[in-house]
Image (cartoon, rainbow, N blue to C red):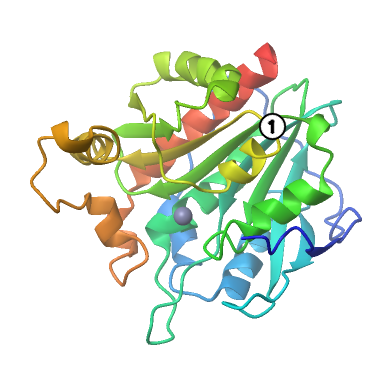
């Protein structure tokens, strides 16, 4: 896991592709409805990392954003050869401090050499964040918002480590990570056992109070790219969308130990879907993507106001 200490991280600077003048957009508190999120998700499901990255860059551009590409190379280890990855970043506003909103877009490879569909983990959240970036452009913001789609999370959080290593950690006020969309009623978040993240949890509770979906805090929570930021002392939180029953089961499995009441060897549904051939678009719904979009936007706006 020391691969990134000596990462040769090269940041491709510059404003990105020239997109020409922007068309004027309507201002107002109500967000426009999102025409067809599942059709957008279809563009990346089942494809290799590089193709997924290219489609997501195109999605950003179609939404009027000019994403930047951070290319980085990982050091070879005994277990894996050197890899080249690409983080994709859309920047909104120009405040003195950053709020980073991230999701990994890379997928794992199965033993037979094919890649998994990667709709649940983590294509849906990647597509949602391109939409979040578009929505946030319509708001007046105190912070600079960086929406980052990370590469090589599945190889050991390598994309987010590369990002943190080349950023100024003091400039980043908070980080919101989104990993897994598999149901539409419950937002899971954690790890709430980490006290240094309190400022982010407080804003999340405010956003949740105004939302129609339930939010469930997890003291112990699966690691994702949030941990790269947490390790640098940056307040962070990781989010996922799930169904109510599956969220409760996952909470019990991860946090209740021998008192969970779950049958022995019970495996929460999400762990039977991700990293397998079952990670398909059928597990993702339009309401789930819409709810996630609305909550992430609400959380960013609350953080922007309170930090
Ligand atoms: Zn993931």
Tell whether 11 sits left or right of 219.
Answer: right
Can residue 93 be seen by looking at this rendering? no
Q: Where is residue 215 in the image (x, y as percent from the top left)?
A: 36, 25
Does 221 appear above or below 156?
A: above
Residue 112, quarter of picture: bottom left
- Could you classify mark 1 by the number of other residues whose Cα lies within 10 Å: few (under 14), some (14-19), or many (20 or more)? some
**Left or right for 296, reference 285:** right
What x and y, as percent, mark residue 285?
Answer: 32, 49
Q: Residue at x 38, y 47 (%)?
A: 181
* Rendered residue at 68%/75% (across/down): 83
Residue 272 seen from this side: yes
Q: Is mark 1 on a helix, strand or loop?
A: loop
Q: Where is residue 249 in the image (x, y as percent from the top left)?
A: 20, 39
Q: Is 239 left, or right, of 304 in this rendering?
A: left
The quadrant holding residue 244 is top left
Residue situated in front as seen by the camera: 205 or 7: 7
Quarter placement of the N terminus: bottom right
Please identify the quarter of the rendering in which residue 259 is found. top left
Residue pointed to by mark 1 = 233
In the picture, the quarter occupied by the C terminus is top right
Residue at figure coordinates x 54%, y 21% from the top left: 195
Asked if 264 appears above or below 32 in the picture, the reply is below
The residue sitting at 77% across, 25% down in the picture is 143
Q: Please state the horizontal and vertical placement of residue 232, each as a whole percent of the image.
A: 71, 38
Q: Which residue lies furthest to the bottom in this view?
A: 112
Q: Residue furthest toward the right?
A: 14
**How many numbered discs sit on the rendered protein?**
1
Residue 43 vertical placement versus 241 (above, below): below
């Amino acid at each position: 896991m020391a691969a990134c200490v000596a990462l040769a991280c090269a940041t491709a600077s510059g404003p990105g592709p020239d997109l020409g003048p922007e068309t004027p957009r309507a201002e107002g508190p109500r967000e426009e409805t999102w025409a067809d999120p599942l059709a957008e998700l279809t563009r990346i499901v089942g494809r290799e990392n590089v193709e997924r990255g290219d489609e997501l860059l195109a999605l950003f551009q179609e939404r009027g954003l000019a994403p930047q590409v951070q290319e980085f190379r990982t050091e070879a280890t005994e277990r894996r050869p050197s890899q080249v990855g690409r983080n994709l970043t859309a920047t909104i506003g120009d405040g003195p401090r950053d709020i980073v909103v991230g999701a990994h877009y890379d997928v794992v490879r199965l033993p037979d050499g094919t890649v998994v569909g990667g709709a649940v983990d983590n294509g849906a959240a990647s597509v949602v964040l391109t939409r979040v970036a578009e929505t946030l452009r319509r708001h007046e913001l105190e912070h600079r918002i960086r929406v980052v789609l990370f590469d090589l999370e599945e190889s050991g959080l390598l994309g987010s480590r590369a990002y943190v290593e080349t950023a100024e950690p003091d400039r980043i006020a908070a980080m919101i990570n989104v990993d897994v969309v598999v149901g539409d009623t419950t937002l899971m978040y954690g790890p709430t056992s980490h006290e240094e993240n309190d400022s982010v949890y407080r804003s999340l509770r405010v956003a949740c109070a105004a939302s129609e979906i339930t939010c469930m805090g997890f003291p112990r929570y699966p690691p994702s790219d949030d941990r790269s930021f947490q390790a640098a002392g940056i307040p962070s939180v990781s989010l996922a969308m799930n169904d109510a029953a599956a969220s409760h089961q996952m909470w019990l499995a991860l946090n209740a130990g021998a008192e969970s009441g779950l049958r022995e060897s019970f495996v929460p549904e999400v762990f039977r879907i991700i990293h397998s051939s079952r990670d398909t678009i059928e597990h993702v719904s339009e309401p789930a993507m819409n709810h996630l979009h609305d909550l992430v936007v609400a959380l960013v706006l609350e953080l922007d106001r309170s930090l």
